[in-house]
Amino acid sequence: MSEIRHDSHTDRTTIFAAHRQDRPQVFGSAAAKSCPFCRGNEHETPPAVAVYQQDGHPDTGEWQVRVVPNKFPALTPRDPGQPAIPNGSEPIPSYGVHEVFIESPDHIRSLTQLATAKAQLVLRAYQDRLQTLSSIGELQYAQIFKNVGVNAGASIEHSHSQLLAVEEVPATLQHAFQASQQYHSQTGQLLHQAWIEDARKRQSVVSETDHMIAFCPRVPRFAWETWIMPQTHAPSFSEATQAVLEDAAILLQDIIRRLESLHPQVAYNYLLLTAPFDTSQHDHYHWRMECFPRLDKAAGFEWATGWFLNTMPPETAAKQLRRVNL
């Protein structure tokens, strides 16, 4: 059983999941031969909770995307009828849901190795799982993220992403939601509109489509960090239209290809930041994806202060990304 502890003095929360140290490390030339995510090795993962064929209909034909419970979960579901742990009790079990999106039956490393239609199917699977998990009353928020490469925290080479759904909104995200609400109350403007206007003014837009825009934010933590978000207001990724999902997949692959062109075999992360399941209280928020390469490591100053040292101004990063010939 995993355990969660919170320190009110530092406002830090840690999930203890000792069993995750047993995760396999599957990389290198022999990875495809022993990969639990490849076609034919479905028995090496827990049974799928959702399976997608290329046409987007679940549970028909050969799979293109499988969603499975994580074999080494940081969070575990609460047993039906089990009461919540009273506040102040120790230890506090870390209840929640931890799932893995296996993005292809073929052994690929990066999302850019998928055809665009298959990348769109991955985002469709994200949306479906968010919609499904939002119906579970105990869960309040779900974080979807992708780790590629050892430096980005991946333990398996085969392209995949993950979802952790939790019973409370993490403090850092609560702060982001509150800041968005406060900005709207004070200015009458939505925060994402200010971000997009600022990016255009600074010439930090990298690429855009009819529905989506990708730009380097004004205060990035990492060199070449890029945000991707809808052009029009949208609090929740769960409610994105098919056209928005299609454009999001196009831009996500576009940005990763640019990063990979500048830095071949680069390790990277992306995060999907969306409103909590109770979207009625967060209609001022705007969902986005953050994508960043892991070229530099956080060191003592960053860990002590929460301030990041970045060697690449975002305006320069955007210019370099735009210049990449795809």
Image (tube, rainbow, N blue to C red):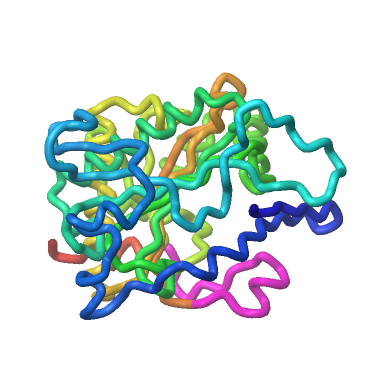
Q: Quadrant of residue 87?
A: top right
Specify whether 294 is left or right of 40. right
Q: Residue at x 74, y 33 (%)?
A: 84
On screen, residue 261 above or below 167: below
Asked whether residue 28 is in view, the answer is yes
Q: Residue furthest top?
A: 280
Q: Quadrant of residue 112?
A: bottom left
Relative image position of residue 125 (x, y in whole percent): 31, 37
Which segment is the magenta one?
297-315
Q: Is residue 46 magenta?
A: no
Relative image position of residue 122 (x, y in whole percent): 27, 43
Asked whether residue 203 is in view, the answer is no
Relative image position of residue 69 (x, y in whole percent): 43, 46
On screen, residue 181 above or below 166: above
Name the quadrant of the C terminus: bottom left
Relative image position of residue 287 (x, y in whole percent): 45, 37
> Between residues 267 and 158, which one lies in front from this camera angle?
158
Q: Residue at x 66, y 47 (%)?
A: 94
> Between residues 74 and 195, which one lies in front from this camera angle?
74
Q: How many numbered circles does the render carry? A: 0
On screen, residue 298 above or below 198: below
Q: Residue at x 51, y 77 (%)?
A: 297
Specify whether 223 is left or right of 60. right
Q: Residue at x 64, y 39 (%)?
A: 169
